[in-house]
């Protein structure tokens, strides 16, 4: 008889957990879905990691644009922007840079707090080389299987020779450094980003070397891109977002950000509404 009593109790418990998950804000749902090997749950305004440590989700501050970039919390990262996968239907709207608000505490906890710590987790990916039939090794983190996801990208690119000129002479992967002109660490610092062929790409600061810090430039910034969207679709299919979907465009740049993309393997992920005035 005890077994018959236990079954409905277990069902009620699991149903309650499911209801709780469904009631969480979309940004939190997406984080938990994207990083199940590291994140355990959400409680009391904190993301709880599998090791028991926590990171505050929302610091409760009303921030200016610059303050949001200098002190991004997870709520800013997840809810102030929307990245749309697939072929873009239009050029990015003014100051819409989905994915550039990054909570540095979160990425350091996930991938490493120092150059040495990140380096210990780097592994090689076999990447197409400039000469047909040749390959070379590039290095990215093994955390979250980023190396496996990038290897899948490499395999697809290698099977499409017409894309070779855009991806073989790459700009780089791991590089512990701040983003140009800021104090914020680049996603390259964590081994989750790759810049493809720079000579066949565009970057807004390179296009405006002499005056990129002037507000007037942003008002007249013209989006440019020469990267085939076929490449973008391949990267997005494996969990990477593209800097070409930013108003402050960086068309060579891809970074592993599964929380910004629809969940795979049948897991639904709600999209946050709204956008923010971001920087690349």
Image (cartoon, helix red, strand yellow):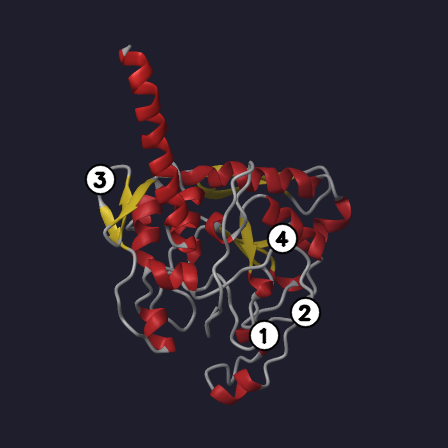
According to the image, label 2 marks what residue?
90
Among the two numbered marks 2 and 4 on one chain, the one whose residue lies closer to the N terminus: 2
- From this view, report whether residue 67 is shown above or below residue 264: below
Among the two numbered marks 1 and 4 on one chain, the one whose residue lies closer to the N terminus: 1
Q: Nearer the viewer, mark 1 or mark 4?
A: 1
* Residue 256, visible in the rendered structure: yes
- Label 2, residues with CA under 10 Å away: few <14, some 14-19, many ≥20: few
Task: Please tell me whether mark 1 sits on a helix, a strand or a loop.
Answer: loop
Task: Please tell me whether mark 2 sits on a helix, a strand or a loop.
Answer: loop
Residue 105 locus on image (x, y percent):
29, 55
Residue at position x 39%, y 38% in the image: 18
Among the two numbered marks 1 and 3 on one chain, the one whose residue lies closer to the N terminus: 3
* Residue 112, visible in the rendered structure: no
- Label 4, residues with CA under 10 Å away: few <14, some 14-19, many ≥20: some
Residue at position x 50%, y 64% in the image: 98
Q: What count of labels does the image hold?
A: 4
Return the mark for residue 141: none
- Mark 2 and 3 residues: CB-CB less than 8 Å, in contact? no
According to the image, label 3 marks what residue?
52
Return the mark for residue 169: 4
- Mark 1 and 2 residues: CB-CB less than 8 Å, in contact? yes
Judge by depth and name the residue closer to the eye, 51 or 113. Answer: 51
């Amino acid at each position: 008889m005890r077994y018959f009593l236990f079954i409905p109790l277990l069902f009620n418990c699991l149903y309650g957990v499911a209801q709780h998950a469904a009631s969480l804000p979309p940004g939190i749902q997406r984080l938990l879905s994207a990083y199940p090997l590291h994140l355990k749950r959400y409680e009391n305004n904190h993301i709880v990691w599998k090791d028991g440590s926590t990171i505050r989700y929302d610091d409760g501050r009303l921030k200016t644009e610059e303050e949001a970039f200098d002190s991004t919390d997870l709520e800013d990262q997840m809810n102030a922007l929307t990245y749309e996968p697939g072929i873009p239907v239009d050029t990015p709207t003014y100051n819409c840079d989905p994915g550039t608000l990054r909570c540095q505490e979160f990425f350091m906890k996930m991938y490493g707090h120092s150059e040495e710590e990140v380096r210990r987790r780097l592994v090689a990916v076999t990447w197409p080389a400039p000469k047909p039939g040749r390959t070379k090794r590039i290095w990215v983190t093994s955390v979250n299987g980023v190396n496996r996801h990038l290897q899948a990208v490499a395999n697809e690119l290698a099977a499409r020779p017409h894309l070779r000129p855009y991806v073989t002479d790459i700009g780089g992967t791991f590089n512990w450094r701040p983003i140009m002109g800021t104090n914020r660490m680049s996603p390259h610092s964590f081994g989750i980003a790759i810049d493809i062929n720079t000579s066949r790409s565009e970057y807004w600061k390179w296009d405006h070397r002499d005056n990129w810090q002037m507000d007037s430039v942003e008002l007249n910034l013209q989006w440019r891109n020469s990267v085939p969207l076929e490449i973008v679709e391949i990267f997005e299919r494996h969990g990477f977002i593209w800097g070409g979907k930013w108003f402050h465009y960086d068309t060579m740049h891809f970074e592993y950000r599964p929380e910004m993309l629809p969940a795979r393997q049948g897991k639904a992920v709600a999209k946050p509404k709204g956008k923010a005035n971001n920087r690349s």
